[in-house]
Amino acid sequence: MSDTLATIRTNVQINLFEDVSSGFWTTAQLNDFINRATLMVAGEVQWELDQNTVSLKTSKTFYLWPSDMLVPLRVRDTTTANGAVNVKIFPTRIEKMEKEMRSWRLVGNGPPSRFSTRGIDYLWIWPPPPPAFANNNMTVDYVPVPASLVNDTDTFDGPKTVIEAVVELATAFALLDKDINAAAKRMDNYAQKLSEARADYGRDNEFHTTKLRPATRYDKAHHTPWMRRTF
Amino acid sequence: MGTETLKTVRDRIRGRLRDPNSVIWTDAQLNRYLNMAQIDLQQRLMWGEDYDTTVVTSSTASYTRVNTDRIQNMKYQVYDGTRINTISQYEIDRVKSDWRTDTATIPARLYRSDWNQDAFWPPPAYSGNPAVTFSQESGCLCRVVSDDPTDAITFSQETGIVIQAYSSANPVDDWYFKRQTYANVSSDSTGEVDMVVPPYKNLTNVYFRWPDTLVNDTDLLSFPDWVHWGIEEHAMMLAYEKEGDGNNPKLAQAHGAAYFEIWLPFIAKMKAQRDATPDAATIWESQTPIKPWTNQLSKLTKWWRPWGGRIW
Protein backbone atom coordinates (compact mmCIF):
# COMPACT_ATOMS: atom_id res chain seq x y z
CA MET A 1 0.00 0.00 0.00
CA SER A 2 1.20 3.59 -0.51
CA ASP A 3 0.00 7.07 0.25
CA THR A 4 1.24 10.35 -1.14
CA LEU A 5 2.73 13.03 1.05
CA ALA A 6 -0.28 15.22 0.32
CA THR A 7 -2.68 12.54 1.54
CA ILE A 8 -0.73 11.89 4.73
CA ARG A 9 -0.48 15.61 5.42
CA THR A 10 -4.21 16.06 4.92
CA ASN A 11 -4.88 13.31 7.46
CA VAL A 12 -2.51 14.97 9.93
CA GLN A 13 -4.24 18.32 9.45
CA ILE A 14 -7.60 16.69 10.10
CA ASN A 15 -6.22 15.28 13.36
CA LEU A 16 -4.96 18.76 14.24
CA PHE A 17 -8.32 20.37 13.37
CA GLU A 18 -6.40 22.55 10.95
CA ASP A 19 -7.67 24.15 7.80
CA VAL A 20 -6.02 22.44 4.85
CA SER A 21 -4.94 25.70 3.23
CA SER A 22 -3.75 27.61 6.29
CA GLY A 23 -3.11 27.06 9.94
CA PHE A 24 -0.74 27.24 12.87
CA TRP A 25 1.77 24.96 11.16
CA THR A 26 3.18 25.61 7.73
CA THR A 27 3.18 22.95 5.03
CA ALA A 28 6.95 22.65 5.32
CA GLN A 29 6.71 22.05 9.07
CA LEU A 30 4.05 19.38 8.67
CA ASN A 31 6.12 17.68 5.97
CA ASP A 32 9.06 17.71 8.35
CA PHE A 33 7.01 16.09 11.13
CA ILE A 34 5.82 13.43 8.69
CA ASN A 35 9.41 12.63 7.70
CA ARG A 36 10.36 12.34 11.35
CA ALA A 37 7.46 10.00 11.92
CA THR A 38 8.35 7.80 8.94
CA LEU A 39 11.89 7.48 10.29
CA MET A 40 10.81 6.55 13.79
CA VAL A 41 8.21 4.04 12.64
CA ALA A 42 10.72 2.51 10.21
CA GLY A 43 13.18 2.06 13.07
CA GLU A 44 10.59 0.58 15.41
CA VAL A 45 8.87 -1.81 13.02
CA GLN A 46 11.74 -2.50 10.58
CA TRP A 47 9.48 -3.93 7.91
CA GLU A 48 11.58 -2.72 5.01
CA LEU A 49 14.74 -4.43 3.79
CA ASP A 50 17.44 -3.17 1.53
CA GLN A 51 20.78 -4.48 0.34
CA ASN A 52 24.09 -3.07 -0.72
CA THR A 53 27.50 -4.48 -1.41
CA VAL A 54 30.88 -3.67 0.04
CA SER A 55 33.82 -4.40 -2.22
CA LEU A 56 36.67 -5.96 -0.30
CA LYS A 57 40.26 -4.83 -0.67
CA THR A 58 43.38 -6.68 0.40
CA SER A 59 44.26 -5.99 4.04
CA LYS A 60 41.54 -3.34 4.36
CA THR A 61 39.46 -3.68 7.51
CA PHE A 62 37.50 -0.42 7.59
CA TYR A 63 34.68 0.24 5.16
CA LEU A 64 31.75 2.61 5.17
CA TRP A 65 28.29 1.31 5.96
CA PRO A 66 25.74 2.11 3.22
CA SER A 67 24.90 5.81 3.55
CA ASP A 68 21.15 5.16 3.87
CA MET A 69 21.49 2.45 6.49
CA LEU A 70 19.51 2.78 9.69
CA VAL A 71 20.12 -0.63 11.25
CA PRO A 72 22.24 -3.50 9.89
CA LEU A 73 20.66 -6.94 9.85
CA ARG A 74 23.26 -9.23 8.32
CA VAL A 75 26.62 -9.11 6.64
CA ARG A 76 27.15 -11.94 4.20
CA ASP A 77 30.27 -13.05 2.43
CA THR A 78 29.18 -13.59 -1.17
CA THR A 79 32.52 -14.88 -2.34
CA THR A 80 33.29 -18.48 -3.03
CA ALA A 81 36.80 -18.27 -1.62
CA ASN A 82 35.47 -19.58 1.64
CA GLY A 83 34.15 -22.62 -0.11
CA ALA A 84 30.57 -21.45 0.31
CA VAL A 85 28.46 -18.56 -0.90
CA ASN A 86 26.35 -16.18 1.18
CA VAL A 87 27.97 -17.26 4.40
CA LYS A 88 27.02 -14.93 7.20
CA ILE A 89 29.80 -13.37 9.26
CA PHE A 90 29.07 -12.67 12.89
CA PRO A 91 28.87 -9.46 14.91
CA THR A 92 31.33 -8.90 17.68
CA ARG A 93 32.74 -6.20 19.93
CA ILE A 94 36.31 -5.27 20.70
CA GLU A 95 35.85 -6.38 24.31
CA LYS A 96 34.83 -9.83 23.14
CA MET A 97 37.79 -10.02 20.78
CA GLU A 98 40.08 -9.17 23.70
CA LYS A 99 38.62 -12.01 25.75
CA GLU A 100 38.82 -14.54 22.94
CA MET A 101 42.32 -13.77 21.71
CA ARG A 102 44.56 -11.09 23.16
CA SER A 103 46.81 -10.93 20.10
CA TRP A 104 44.01 -10.66 17.56
CA ARG A 105 45.45 -7.42 16.20
CA LEU A 106 48.59 -9.22 15.09
CA VAL A 107 46.75 -11.95 13.20
CA GLY A 108 47.53 -11.89 9.50
CA ASN A 109 45.08 -11.88 6.62
CA GLY A 110 42.36 -14.46 6.34
CA PRO A 111 38.72 -15.02 5.33
CA PRO A 112 36.67 -12.43 7.25
CA SER A 113 34.59 -14.04 9.97
CA ARG A 114 33.65 -11.13 12.27
CA PHE A 115 32.33 -7.61 11.88
CA SER A 116 31.53 -4.67 14.08
CA THR A 117 30.53 -1.03 13.88
CA ARG A 118 33.32 1.40 14.69
CA GLY A 119 32.31 4.92 15.56
CA ILE A 120 29.21 6.08 13.73
CA ASP A 121 29.74 5.23 10.08
CA TYR A 122 32.35 2.52 9.77
CA LEU A 123 31.98 -1.19 9.15
CA TRP A 124 34.97 -3.08 10.46
CA ILE A 125 35.68 -6.66 9.46
CA TRP A 126 38.23 -9.09 10.77
CA PRO A 127 40.56 -10.68 9.85
CA PRO A 128 41.78 -8.42 7.05
CA PRO A 129 40.93 -9.97 3.67
CA PRO A 130 43.74 -11.80 1.84
CA PRO A 131 44.54 -11.09 -1.84
CA ALA A 132 42.20 -13.90 -2.92
CA PHE A 133 39.28 -11.83 -1.60
CA ALA A 134 40.19 -8.58 -3.31
CA ASN A 135 37.29 -7.07 -5.28
CA ASN A 136 34.90 -9.70 -4.00
CA ASN A 137 31.75 -8.47 -2.35
CA MET A 138 30.23 -8.57 1.06
CA THR A 139 26.48 -8.06 1.00
CA VAL A 140 24.94 -5.96 3.74
CA ASP A 141 21.25 -6.53 4.50
CA TYR A 142 19.86 -3.56 6.38
CA VAL A 143 16.85 -1.53 7.32
CA PRO A 144 17.10 1.70 5.33
CA VAL A 145 16.37 5.24 6.44
CA PRO A 146 13.11 6.04 4.64
CA ALA A 147 13.47 8.33 1.65
CA SER A 148 12.52 11.90 2.46
CA LEU A 149 9.09 12.93 1.23
CA VAL A 150 9.52 16.31 -0.45
CA ASN A 151 6.91 16.79 -3.16
CA ASP A 152 3.21 16.30 -2.65
CA THR A 153 3.24 13.43 -5.13
CA ASP A 154 6.04 11.55 -3.37
CA THR A 155 4.75 8.26 -2.02
CA PHE A 156 5.38 6.43 1.22
CA ASP A 157 5.19 2.69 0.65
CA GLY A 158 4.22 0.60 3.61
CA PRO A 159 1.52 -1.50 5.20
CA LYS A 160 -1.69 0.24 6.18
CA THR A 161 -1.07 -0.11 9.91
CA VAL A 162 2.36 1.49 9.45
CA ILE A 163 0.90 4.47 7.58
CA GLU A 164 -1.69 4.94 10.30
CA ALA A 165 1.07 4.92 12.90
CA VAL A 166 2.97 7.55 10.89
CA VAL A 167 -0.08 9.84 10.84
CA GLU A 168 -0.58 9.55 14.60
CA LEU A 169 3.08 10.16 15.39
CA ALA A 170 3.34 13.14 13.01
CA THR A 171 0.27 14.63 14.72
CA ALA A 172 1.91 14.16 18.11
CA PHE A 173 5.13 15.82 16.93
CA ALA A 174 3.16 18.81 15.68
CA LEU A 175 1.22 19.13 18.94
CA LEU A 176 4.48 19.27 20.92
CA ASP A 177 4.84 22.81 19.57
CA LYS A 178 1.50 23.81 21.03
CA ASP A 179 -0.03 21.57 23.68
CA ILE A 180 1.84 18.84 25.53
CA ASN A 181 -1.34 17.28 26.96
CA ALA A 182 -2.86 16.86 23.53
CA ALA A 183 0.47 15.47 22.30
CA ALA A 184 0.46 12.89 25.10
CA LYS A 185 -2.98 11.68 24.07
CA ARG A 186 -1.83 11.34 20.49
CA MET A 187 1.20 9.36 21.65
CA ASP A 188 -1.21 6.88 23.27
CA ASN A 189 -2.89 6.43 19.90
CA TYR A 190 0.51 6.04 18.26
CA ALA A 191 1.56 3.43 20.80
CA GLN A 192 -1.50 1.36 19.94
CA LYS A 193 -0.96 1.67 16.20
CA LEU A 194 2.72 0.85 16.58
CA SER A 195 1.92 -2.24 18.59
CA GLU A 196 -0.39 -3.46 15.83
CA ALA A 197 2.16 -2.70 13.14
CA ARG A 198 4.90 -4.54 15.03
CA ALA A 199 2.73 -7.56 15.62
CA ASP A 200 1.87 -7.74 11.92
CA TYR A 201 5.11 -6.74 10.28
CA GLY A 202 7.89 -6.63 12.88
CA ARG A 203 11.00 -8.33 11.64
CA ASP A 204 12.47 -11.33 13.39
CA ASN A 205 16.19 -10.96 13.87
CA GLU A 206 18.97 -12.41 15.88
CA PHE A 207 18.21 -10.06 18.75
CA HIS A 208 14.92 -11.82 19.35
CA THR A 209 16.22 -15.30 19.88
CA THR A 210 14.25 -17.65 22.03
CA LYS A 211 15.50 -20.54 24.05
CA LEU A 212 13.81 -23.49 22.46
CA ARG A 213 13.19 -26.26 24.87
CA PRO A 214 12.92 -29.80 23.58
CA ALA A 215 9.38 -30.20 22.29
CA THR A 216 7.74 -32.42 24.85
CA ARG A 217 4.33 -30.88 24.45
CA TYR A 218 2.54 -28.21 22.44
CA ASP A 219 3.79 -24.78 23.53
CA LYS A 220 2.41 -21.72 21.80
CA ALA A 221 5.26 -19.59 23.18
CA HIS A 222 7.31 -20.94 20.27
CA HIS A 223 5.01 -19.30 17.78
CA THR A 224 5.61 -15.91 16.25
CA PRO A 225 3.59 -13.14 17.93
CA TRP A 226 0.88 -12.98 15.30
CA MET A 227 0.23 -16.68 15.62
CA ARG A 228 -0.13 -16.40 19.38
CA ARG A 229 -3.01 -14.01 19.03
CA THR A 230 -5.11 -16.37 16.97
CA PHE A 231 -5.23 -19.07 19.66
CA MET B 1 28.51 12.27 9.76
CA GLY B 2 25.59 14.36 8.52
CA THR B 3 24.96 16.31 5.36
CA GLU B 4 22.84 19.09 6.86
CA THR B 5 24.62 22.34 7.57
CA LEU B 6 24.37 24.38 10.73
CA LYS B 7 22.31 26.98 8.87
CA THR B 8 19.77 24.41 7.66
CA VAL B 9 19.10 23.06 11.14
CA ARG B 10 19.13 26.50 12.73
CA ASP B 11 16.61 27.86 10.19
CA ARG B 12 14.35 24.91 10.89
CA ILE B 13 14.47 25.61 14.61
CA ARG B 14 13.89 29.31 14.01
CA GLY B 15 10.79 28.49 12.00
CA ARG B 16 9.38 26.37 14.81
CA LEU B 17 10.24 29.06 17.34
CA ARG B 18 8.34 31.51 15.12
CA ASP B 19 11.16 34.02 15.32
CA PRO B 20 12.16 34.47 11.65
CA ASN B 21 13.80 37.85 12.17
CA SER B 22 15.98 36.88 15.14
CA VAL B 23 14.13 39.23 17.45
CA ILE B 24 14.09 36.92 20.49
CA TRP B 25 16.87 34.40 19.77
CA THR B 26 20.06 35.42 17.99
CA ASP B 27 21.97 33.11 15.68
CA ALA B 28 24.76 32.90 18.24
CA GLN B 29 22.33 31.69 20.90
CA LEU B 30 20.80 29.04 18.66
CA ASN B 31 24.28 27.92 17.58
CA ARG B 32 25.19 27.54 21.22
CA TYR B 33 22.07 25.49 21.94
CA LEU B 34 22.87 23.18 19.02
CA ASN B 35 26.44 22.72 20.24
CA MET B 36 25.18 21.93 23.73
CA ALA B 37 22.69 19.44 22.30
CA GLN B 38 25.40 17.65 20.30
CA ILE B 39 27.63 17.44 23.35
CA ASP B 40 24.78 16.11 25.47
CA LEU B 41 24.01 13.39 22.94
CA GLN B 42 27.63 12.31 22.71
CA GLN B 43 27.97 12.36 26.49
CA ARG B 44 24.99 10.07 26.96
CA LEU B 45 25.58 7.70 24.05
CA MET B 46 29.40 7.66 23.75
CA TRP B 47 28.93 7.21 20.02
CA GLY B 48 31.60 9.15 18.13
CA GLU B 49 35.07 7.60 18.13
CA ASP B 50 38.47 8.50 16.82
CA TYR B 51 42.05 7.42 17.25
CA ASP B 52 45.56 8.77 17.09
CA THR B 53 49.04 7.35 17.48
CA THR B 54 51.74 8.61 19.82
CA VAL B 55 55.33 8.01 18.78
CA VAL B 56 57.21 6.32 21.58
CA THR B 57 60.87 7.00 22.39
CA SER B 58 62.96 4.44 24.22
CA SER B 59 63.45 5.11 27.95
CA THR B 60 60.86 7.91 27.89
CA ALA B 61 57.92 6.94 30.09
CA SER B 62 55.56 9.90 29.93
CA TYR B 63 53.74 11.28 26.89
CA THR B 64 51.39 14.21 26.56
CA ARG B 65 48.07 13.60 24.84
CA VAL B 66 47.75 15.85 21.81
CA ASN B 67 44.00 15.93 21.20
CA THR B 68 42.77 16.77 24.68
CA ASP B 69 40.15 19.13 23.29
CA ARG B 70 38.58 16.24 21.41
CA ILE B 71 39.00 13.35 23.83
CA GLN B 72 35.82 12.73 25.80
CA ASN B 73 37.02 9.50 27.34
CA MET B 74 39.71 7.03 26.46
CA LYS B 75 38.18 3.82 25.16
CA TYR B 76 41.31 1.70 25.12
CA GLN B 77 44.97 1.97 24.25
CA VAL B 78 47.17 -0.34 22.21
CA TYR B 79 50.93 -0.67 22.50
CA ASP B 80 52.89 -2.55 19.89
CA GLY B 81 49.80 -4.23 18.50
CA THR B 82 48.43 -5.49 21.81
CA ARG B 83 46.00 -3.80 24.16
CA ILE B 84 47.73 -2.36 27.19
CA ASN B 85 45.76 -2.04 30.40
CA THR B 86 45.74 0.98 32.65
CA ILE B 87 46.57 1.05 36.32
CA SER B 88 46.74 3.63 39.09
CA GLN B 89 49.97 4.62 40.77
CA TYR B 90 48.52 3.49 44.10
CA GLU B 91 48.19 -0.05 42.79
CA ILE B 92 51.73 -0.11 41.48
CA ASP B 93 52.96 1.16 44.87
CA ARG B 94 51.27 -1.79 46.53
CA VAL B 95 52.84 -4.24 44.11
CA LYS B 96 56.35 -2.81 43.89
CA SER B 97 57.48 0.07 46.07
CA ASP B 98 60.60 0.92 44.00
CA TRP B 99 58.87 0.83 40.61
CA ARG B 100 59.79 4.41 39.84
CA THR B 101 63.44 3.37 39.41
CA ASP B 102 62.74 0.43 37.13
CA THR B 103 64.90 0.21 34.03
CA ALA B 104 63.44 0.28 30.59
CA THR B 105 61.95 -2.95 29.31
CA ILE B 106 58.67 -4.05 27.76
CA PRO B 107 55.90 -1.93 29.33
CA ALA B 108 53.30 -3.86 31.28
CA ARG B 109 50.82 -1.14 32.18
CA LEU B 110 49.89 2.44 31.44
CA TYR B 111 49.09 4.97 34.14
CA ARG B 112 48.04 8.59 34.04
CA SER B 113 50.80 10.78 35.41
CA ASP B 114 48.71 13.90 34.89
CA TRP B 115 45.26 14.68 33.51
CA ASN B 116 46.64 14.78 29.98
CA GLN B 117 49.67 12.54 30.30
CA ASP B 118 50.02 8.81 29.79
CA ALA B 119 53.02 7.05 31.25
CA PHE B 120 54.39 3.55 30.76
CA TRP B 121 55.41 1.26 33.53
CA PRO B 122 58.13 0.18 33.15
CA PRO B 123 59.51 2.67 30.62
CA PRO B 124 59.75 1.29 27.08
CA ALA B 125 63.08 -0.12 25.91
CA TYR B 126 62.31 0.45 22.22
CA SER B 127 61.42 3.38 20.06
CA GLY B 128 58.53 3.31 17.65
CA ASN B 129 59.69 3.52 14.07
CA PRO B 130 57.94 5.98 11.82
CA ALA B 131 58.22 4.63 8.32
CA VAL B 132 58.77 8.00 6.70
CA THR B 133 59.31 11.47 8.11
CA PHE B 134 58.58 14.46 5.92
CA SER B 135 60.44 17.58 6.84
CA GLN B 136 61.10 19.24 3.48
CA GLU B 137 59.52 18.12 0.30
CA SER B 138 59.17 19.76 -3.06
CA GLY B 139 55.60 19.32 -4.02
CA CYS B 140 53.09 17.95 -1.62
CA LEU B 141 50.36 15.39 -1.30
CA CYS B 142 47.50 17.27 -2.89
CA ARG B 143 44.40 15.24 -2.23
CA VAL B 144 43.20 12.35 -0.20
CA VAL B 145 40.30 10.80 -2.06
CA SER B 146 38.45 9.85 1.08
CA ASP B 147 39.05 10.00 4.74
CA ASP B 148 39.46 6.26 4.83
CA PRO B 149 43.12 5.61 5.55
CA THR B 150 43.55 2.80 3.05
CA ASP B 151 41.80 4.25 0.07
CA ALA B 152 43.54 5.54 -3.06
CA ILE B 153 45.76 8.57 -2.66
CA THR B 154 46.41 11.04 -5.48
CA PHE B 155 49.71 12.79 -5.97
CA SER B 156 50.03 15.81 -8.18
CA GLN B 157 53.34 17.46 -8.92
CA GLU B 158 55.98 15.79 -6.87
CA THR B 159 59.72 15.92 -6.97
CA GLY B 160 60.22 12.26 -6.34
CA ILE B 161 57.22 10.06 -5.78
CA VAL B 162 56.61 7.77 -2.86
CA ILE B 163 55.25 4.48 -4.14
CA GLN B 164 54.52 2.84 -0.85
CA ALA B 165 55.54 3.09 2.76
CA TYR B 166 55.21 0.15 5.05
CA SER B 167 56.68 -1.34 8.15
CA SER B 168 59.07 -4.18 7.53
CA ALA B 169 57.63 -5.88 10.61
CA ASN B 170 54.34 -6.32 8.76
CA PRO B 171 54.19 -5.58 5.04
CA VAL B 172 50.44 -5.06 5.06
CA ASP B 173 50.88 -1.72 6.86
CA ASP B 174 50.38 1.32 4.73
CA TRP B 175 49.85 5.04 5.06
CA TYR B 176 48.39 6.21 8.33
CA PHE B 177 46.52 9.48 8.16
CA LYS B 178 44.59 10.91 11.01
CA ARG B 179 41.19 9.53 10.21
CA GLN B 180 38.56 12.27 10.15
CA THR B 181 35.42 10.69 11.50
CA TYR B 182 34.08 14.19 11.67
CA ALA B 183 34.91 16.68 8.95
CA ASN B 184 34.61 20.29 9.97
CA VAL B 185 34.62 21.95 6.59
CA SER B 186 36.23 25.12 7.83
CA SER B 187 39.32 23.30 9.09
CA ASP B 188 39.72 20.67 6.38
CA SER B 189 43.35 19.86 5.89
CA THR B 190 43.46 18.54 2.38
CA GLY B 191 46.93 17.92 1.11
CA GLU B 192 48.92 17.53 4.25
CA VAL B 193 50.89 14.58 5.57
CA ASP B 194 52.44 15.13 8.95
CA MET B 195 54.08 11.82 9.48
CA VAL B 196 53.45 8.22 8.74
CA VAL B 197 53.36 6.38 12.03
CA PRO B 198 52.95 2.61 12.07
CA PRO B 199 51.50 1.08 15.24
CA TYR B 200 54.48 -1.08 16.15
CA LYS B 201 56.32 -0.01 19.28
CA ASN B 202 54.05 3.04 19.37
CA LEU B 203 51.00 3.86 21.45
CA THR B 204 47.63 3.99 19.69
CA ASN B 205 44.87 5.79 21.58
CA VAL B 206 41.28 4.95 20.71
CA TYR B 207 38.88 7.36 22.32
CA PHE B 208 35.34 8.64 22.39
CA ARG B 209 35.45 12.11 20.97
CA TRP B 210 33.48 15.30 21.37
CA PRO B 211 31.70 16.59 18.28
CA ASP B 212 33.36 19.42 16.40
CA THR B 213 32.09 22.81 17.52
CA LEU B 214 29.66 24.32 15.01
CA VAL B 215 30.86 27.80 14.13
CA ASN B 216 30.20 28.67 10.49
CA ASP B 217 26.90 28.35 8.69
CA THR B 218 28.40 25.72 6.40
CA ASP B 219 29.66 23.48 9.19
CA LEU B 220 28.17 19.98 9.22
CA LEU B 221 26.67 18.38 12.28
CA SER B 222 28.59 15.42 13.60
CA PHE B 223 25.78 12.90 13.63
CA PRO B 224 23.75 11.33 10.79
CA ASP B 225 20.88 13.42 9.41
CA TRP B 226 18.23 11.24 11.06
CA VAL B 227 19.70 12.11 14.48
CA HIS B 228 19.42 15.86 13.86
CA TRP B 229 15.73 15.88 14.72
CA GLY B 230 16.54 14.72 18.23
CA ILE B 231 19.27 17.36 18.55
CA GLU B 232 16.73 19.92 17.38
CA GLU B 233 14.27 19.05 20.17
CA HIS B 234 16.99 19.49 22.78
CA ALA B 235 17.98 22.85 21.28
CA MET B 236 14.35 23.99 21.34
CA MET B 237 14.07 23.00 24.99
CA LEU B 238 17.11 25.15 25.75
CA ALA B 239 15.67 28.01 23.71
CA TYR B 240 12.43 28.03 25.66
CA GLU B 241 14.34 27.87 28.95
CA LYS B 242 16.11 31.14 28.15
CA GLU B 243 15.33 33.84 30.69
CA GLY B 244 13.49 36.91 29.45
CA ASP B 245 11.71 37.15 26.12
CA GLY B 246 10.81 33.78 24.71
CA ASN B 247 10.79 32.02 28.07
CA ASN B 248 8.07 29.37 28.02
CA PRO B 249 8.36 26.63 30.67
CA LYS B 250 5.48 24.58 29.25
CA LEU B 251 6.96 24.39 25.76
CA ALA B 252 10.40 23.78 27.27
CA GLN B 253 8.87 20.82 29.10
CA ALA B 254 7.22 19.60 25.92
CA HIS B 255 10.41 19.66 23.89
CA GLY B 256 12.38 18.24 26.79
CA ALA B 257 9.93 15.34 26.89
CA ALA B 258 10.30 14.93 23.13
CA TYR B 259 14.08 14.68 23.50
CA PHE B 260 14.43 12.61 26.67
CA GLU B 261 11.44 10.32 26.29
CA ILE B 262 11.07 9.92 22.53
CA TRP B 263 14.19 10.74 20.55
CA LEU B 264 16.94 9.76 22.96
CA PRO B 265 15.63 6.22 23.57
CA PHE B 266 15.02 5.80 19.85
CA ILE B 267 18.52 6.95 18.88
CA ALA B 268 20.05 4.80 21.60
CA LYS B 269 18.08 1.79 20.39
CA MET B 270 19.21 2.31 16.80
CA LYS B 271 22.81 2.78 17.98
CA ALA B 272 22.63 -0.46 19.95
CA GLN B 273 21.38 -2.33 16.89
CA ARG B 274 24.01 -0.69 14.67
CA ASP B 275 26.62 -1.94 17.12
CA ALA B 276 25.21 -5.31 16.11
CA THR B 277 25.49 -7.12 19.39
CA PRO B 278 22.55 -8.90 20.97
CA ASP B 279 23.48 -8.14 24.56
CA ALA B 280 22.96 -4.38 24.22
CA ALA B 281 19.99 -4.56 21.88
CA THR B 282 17.94 -6.97 23.97
CA ILE B 283 17.48 -4.30 26.60
CA TRP B 284 15.21 -2.47 24.17
CA GLU B 285 13.27 -5.30 22.58
CA SER B 286 9.64 -5.54 23.41
CA GLN B 287 6.98 -7.78 22.01
CA THR B 288 4.31 -6.51 24.37
CA PRO B 289 1.99 -3.62 23.62
CA ILE B 290 3.39 -0.32 24.74
CA LYS B 291 1.61 1.20 27.71
CA PRO B 292 0.58 4.91 27.70
CA TRP B 293 3.73 6.62 26.67
CA THR B 294 4.38 8.81 29.69
CA ASN B 295 4.31 5.80 31.99
CA GLN B 296 6.16 3.37 29.81
CA LEU B 297 8.84 5.56 28.37
CA SER B 298 9.50 7.34 31.64
CA LYS B 299 10.91 4.05 32.91
CA LEU B 300 13.65 4.38 30.34
CA THR B 301 14.65 7.87 31.41
CA LYS B 302 16.25 6.50 34.57
CA TRP B 303 19.07 5.18 32.40
CA TRP B 304 19.90 8.69 31.36
CA ARG B 305 20.25 10.38 34.68
CA PRO B 306 23.88 11.36 35.18
CA TRP B 307 24.32 9.30 38.31
CA GLY B 308 22.83 6.25 36.62
CA GLY B 309 25.65 6.18 34.15
CA ARG B 310 25.43 4.46 30.84
CA ILE B 311 24.26 0.92 30.42
CA TRP B 312 27.00 -0.31 28.11
Image (cartoon, coloured by chain):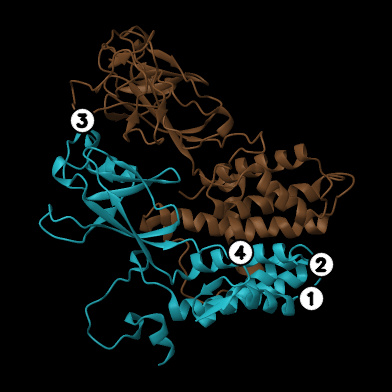
Chain colours: A cyan, B brown
Determine which residue is flagged by label 2: A24
**Secondary structure at numbered mark 4:** loop
* Front-most of residues A166 and B87: A166
- Whether tag 3 and tag 2 are in contact, CB under 8 A, the answer is no
Q: Residue at x 59, y 62 (%)?
A: B299
Q: Earlier in the sequence, mark 2 or mark 1?
A: 1
Task: Judge whether residue B291 can be spotted in this image.
Answer: no
Q: Position of residue B18 (x, y in %)?
A: 82, 55
As drawn, B5 above or below B51: below
Amino acid at dot 1: Glu
Q: Earlier in the sequence, mark 4 or mark 2?
A: 2
Amino acid at dot 2: Phe
As drawn, A92 above or below A211: above
Q: Give the distance between the C-alpha atoms of the residues marked 4 and 2, in whole angstroms.
A: 20 Å
Q: Position of residue A86 (x, y in %)?
A: 20, 61
Amino acid at dot 4: Val
